[in-house]
Every structure is written in structure tokens, then in C-alpha cells.
Image (cartoon, grey):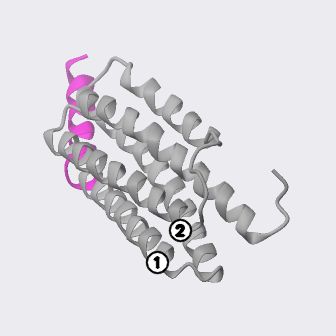
Amino acid sequence: MKLDNLKTLYINELRDLYNAENQLVKALPKMAKAASSQQLKDAFEKHLEQTKTHVERLEEVFEEINEKPKGRTCKAMKGLIEEGSEILHEDGEESVIDAGIIVAAQKVEHYEIAGYGSVRTFAELLGKNKSAELLQTTLNEESETNETLNQLAEGIVNPEAVMETEMAAASA
């Protein structure tokens, strides 16, 4: 694909996000299943439902520009999911593994925040106001998910991981 104008880049990035979101629809249930913290499981289950809605919103955006959403594999998301799945197979203290799952999830959220911020700006510049609003809504939800992960990490998971680590060291 020759990137000779902003619309072409916009379509390219939308396809990347569409594929990324579809990869996440498959990965989030695995993350929820692997989490030991019920609050973390709940957060992943909620975000799975949001992610399905993100896919639908992207399909609306593609309709507005008369393009098909498929045709691109998001290699970055594939790599982030592969890296994150490694933690799901580790042995160790449950809260430490939960902390690792949060790290992996936040890497994904930051990638999505960057992507949605860019395509929202492209939509605005291209005069696609309805699409810009849809993309902003998704961007807001991605930011909220990131903040939820921050709160879980700081308030529950990381303190538990410290305690489990200290208890394991004391009994060794």
C-alpha cells in the first residue's frame, strides 16, 4: 500500500486497530481465566464486552468511508499478546502473576490509546466528524481501562505481591 495521502494512512491504521481489537477478543478471556484476583477477572470481562463494541464501532467507521475493515494484521498486538501470554504460563505466587498480567494488559492499553488518538485526529482532519466521535468514545474507554488497571495494581495486586514475596522469603 502506497501511503501517498492522509486518507490512505487513516484506512491503514483503522485496519490495524480492527485486527488488534479482534485479536484481543480472543486473548481477553484467557487473561481473565488466568487472573487470581476476582477484581482483575471482572475488569478483563468488562473490557472484553467493551472490546466487542470497539470492533462494532470500527465497522461503523469503515462504513462511513466505504472501505472493508480487513486486510491487515496488527503485528504489534500479536507480539504484545504473545509476550503477555508468557506470564499466563508461569509458576509462582498468584498476586505476582496478576501483577505481571496487569503489566501486559497496560502495554496493550497504551498501544491502543496511541492508535485511537491518532485515527481520531485523522478523522477530524478528513472531516469525518461522526467517525471522530466514535473513535473518541473508544479512546475514552481505553483510557478508563488503563486507569482501572492502575487502581487494581496500586490498591490490591501489587501490595499483595509484596506481602506474598516477603512471606515466601521469610519461610525460606
Position of 140 with respect to 11 (left or right) is: left
Q: Nearer the viewer, residue 150 or 171?
A: 150
In this view, which residue lies farthest toward the front?
Answer: 66
Badge number at residue 64: 2
Badge number at residue 36: none
Quadrant in the picture for the C terminus: top left
Residue 126 percent location from the top left of the image: 65, 79
Pick whichever of labels 2 and 1 is earlier in the sequence: 2
Q: CA distance from mark 2 to mark 1?
A: 8 Å
Q: Callout 2, which amino acid?
A: Glu
In this view, which residue lies farthest toward the left?
Answer: 38
Instruction: Check if mark 2's residue and mark 1's residue have beta carbons within 8 Å.
Output: yes
Q: Which residues are magenta?
A: 154-172
Q: Is residue 170 magenta?
A: yes
Q: Residue at x 24, y 28 (%)?
A: 33
The part of the image, by quadrant, that contains residue 169 is top left
Whether residue 108 is situated above or below residue 31 in the rendered picture: below
Q: Residue at x 85, y 65 (%)?
A: 4
Q: Residue at x 53, y 68 (%)?
A: 64
